[in-house]
Image (cartoon, rainbow, N blue to C red):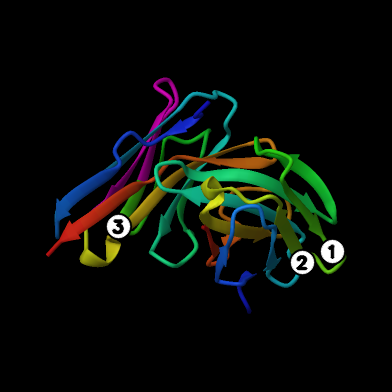
Amino acid sequence: DQQVKQNSPSLSVQEGRISILNCDYTNSMFDYFLWYKKYPAEGPTFLISISSIKDKNEDGRFTVFLNKSAKHLSLHIVPSQPGDSAVYFCAASGGNKLVFGAGTILRVKS
Amino acid sequence: KAGVTQTPRYLIKTRGQQVTLSCSPISGHRSVSWYQQTPGQGLQFLFEYFSETQRNKGNFPGRFSGRQFSNSRSEMNVSTLELGDSALYLCASSLMVRFDNYGYTFGSGTRLTVV
């Protein structure tokens, strides 16, 4: 039962363009959503989050959008940089645990 | 301040053996969670400890167990290893059981290979 889904295993974007990573969830009780970034041989690092009472949160080049009616969130990175190349995990919190998606590999080409 | 420390970083074990992984959380953090990462499956939640008590458990067989000590350090054990247990095991710590942007921090993980 995958409650958080990232349907795109990978995404390739040209440097300077926008990267859009998508995430869908099924549990309407989730109250907080987070994005993590992971480089090889390192643990995931927190990137940005959004509460279920908001529909947008922005932090520098990173913006997360939440569409509760569609149970969908997305991460926009503008402009994309080669250093953004990593695996991005979407996560949702409900109760005492964090549920992660399978991740999307982002490659930013220079 | 020191981050979350996981030891060992790499481990190779044989099928049927058992293994113990260790996690030292950030000083002052009382909640420790464990995750298994495999390709295509993302991070699967194993269990979470808070003040030495297991508060939550994921859908893993009983071969996977854990504990937390009074100093908040945590260990997880996998008995009767199977090839499918090969994965990156990640530990995360936080000040309390909450998942907003207040310091839910991951370690670098232990890469377990079962041969």
Residue depicted at 65% across the width and 45% down the height: B46
Q: Which mark is residue B69?
A: 1
What chain is tagged by disc 2?
B
Mark toward the viewer: 2 or 3: 2
Q: Nearer the viewer, residue A78 or B24?
A: B24
The type of residue carrying mark 1 is Phe
Residue depicted at 73% across the width and 54% down the height: B96
Q: Nearer the viewer, residue A88 or B109?
A: B109
Question: Is the stretch drawn in magenta largely helix, strand or loop?
Answer: strand
Residue A73's spot in the image, x, y percent? 39, 35
Estimate how packed mark 1 is, as few (under 14), some (14 to 19) or many (20 or more) residues with alpha carbons within 10 Å. few
Residue A101's spot in the image, x, y percent? 45, 40
The type of residue carrying mark 2 is Arg
Gap between marks 2 and 1 measured at Cα:
5 Å
Q: Which residues are magenta?
A: A64-79
Can you identify the residue that label 2 sits on?
B73
